[in-house]
Amino acid sequence: MTTILRPEDYGATLGIADSTEAFRRLFAEIAKRSRRDPGGDRLQAPVVIELSGQYTVSGTISFAAASRTQGITVRGAGKRTSEIVMTGGAPLFTNPDTAMGVRFYDCSFRSTNPKASFLYSTSTGGAQDWGFNNVEWRGRWSYGIGLDGPPEDSNCNSEWFFNNCHVGGSYEKAWLWSGMTPTIKQQDQFLNFSLRDCKVEFEYGDALRFDRGGSIVVSGGSWIIKGVRSDGGPSRFFNFPAAPSPHADSVQSLLVEGVRFEPRKPMNLVIESDWKGQITFLNCLDDAWAYQPQSAADDYAPHRYTNPGGVRYTGCQLTGRHRVTQTAPPSRQAIVYDQCARTVGSRRTKAAFLDLQGAYASSIRISHRDDRDGIT
C-alpha cells in the first residue's frame, strides 16, 4: 500500500520560513519505511511526497537509505503552485548511490543562490531510472542535475526521462551535467536520456553538457537561450567537450527531432561537439537569426564540430554557417545534409555555408543530397 507523506506533518510551513529540517525528517521517515522487495534485491519505498504549496529550504536533503531503494514519488498540484525554493549554496537533493525509480510530477524548483544545484547524484550502480513529468526549474543555479561517480566504478546514473518539463532560469555550468569527473572512463556509461516536448527557455548556460559519453534522444519542444553569460562566453543547447581520454565507441549518440532552436544572441550555439559518434538532427529549425543580413552574421556559426564521426541533418532549415574543424586525419567520418535548406540567401552555396578549419580541412567528407538550395 502506498503511503502519502506531507512536509507539513514533519514541521514544514508554507512561505519563507526555513523548512530544511522538516524535509530531512520526512526523508529519514522514508528510509525507515523501506522494506525488502520480495521479488528482487532492492528495498521498496512505496511513498508519495505530496507538496501542497511553496516551501523554502536552505540546506541539502538526501535520498540516502540503508540499501538501494526504489519507488519514491514527489507529486505537486502544478508548476509554481507547488514549489521548493532553495536559498543555500549546496545541492538541494543528493543521491548517494541508493535511490532508483524516483518520479517527480507537477511541481517547480527555484534557486535564489547562484551556487546552488538541484541534484548531485553519484553512482556505482544504485542511482538510475529517474523521471520528471511537468516539472519546472527556474532561478539562478550553478548547475541543475549533476551526475558523477567515484573512481572505482561509476556505472549507471542512467535511464533518465523528462516529459513536458520547463527549463528556465540561468546556469553557471549546465542544467543537465553528466560526467562531472571526466577522467573516469566509466562515466561513458551514463546512458539513455530522453526529453520529450520540453520547453527549454533559459537565460544562459548549457542545457545539456556531457563531458563523457551519452545516448540522448530529444523530441519536440521549444528551445531558446534568451540572454548572455556575464563574461560574454557562449551558452549552448548541447555541449560535448573533448574528454581527457578516448570515449567508448558505443556511447556518443544524439538524436534530435522536430525542435525549433533560438540561440538568439550571436555568441550562443546550438551545438559544440568533440564527439566521434553519431549526431542526427531531423526536421529541426534554428532560424532565430534569419532576418539578419549576411554582413551581420559572417561569424555566426551555431553548429560546431571538432574531428566529428557521423553527423546528419535531414529536412532541416538552417541559419548561419556550420563550422567543422579537423585537426587529425578523418577516420570513419561521414557528414550528410539531406533535403536541407538555408534561411539566408547568401548562404545557399557550399563555400558560404561551410566553415572548414584545421590542418586536415581538405579531407573532411561532406555530402549534400536532394538539397533544396541546389548544393551538391
Image (cartoon, rainbow, N blue to C red):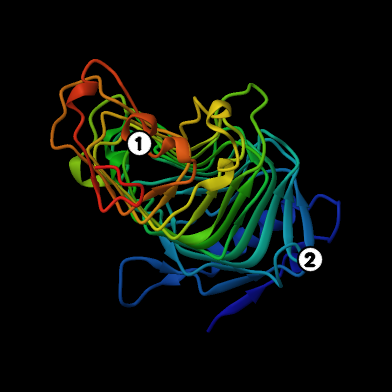
Q: Can residue 266 be seen in this snapshot?
A: yes
Give percent across and percent down for residue 341: 39, 49
Q: Secondary structure at mark 1?
A: loop
Give percent across and percent down for residue 33: 54, 70
244 w.r.t. 164: above or below: above
Amino acid at dot 2: Gly
Amino acid at dot 1: Thr
Q: Secondary structure at mark 2?
A: loop
Q: Which residue is mark 1?
A: 349
Among the 4 quarters of the image, the one containing residue 129: bottom left
> Which residue is drawn at the image coordinates 47% and 40% (left, top)?
345
Give percent across and percent down for residue 142: 61, 35
Compute the Cα span from label 2 to label 1: 55 Å
N-terminal-most mark, 2 or 1: 2
Q: Can residue 241 be seen in this snapshot?
A: no
Q: Nearer the viewer, residue 74 or 3?
A: 74
Among the 4 quarters of the image, the one containing residue 25: bottom right
Among the 4 quarters of the image, the one containing residue 325: top left
> Which residue is drawn at the image coordinates 58% and 61% (left, top)?
165
Left or right: 58 with respect to 61? right
Q: Nearer the viewer, residue 157 or 23?
A: 157
Give percent across and percent down for residue 212: 33, 37
Residue at the bottom extreme, as displayed: 1
Q: Nearer the viewer, mark 2 or mark 1?
A: 1
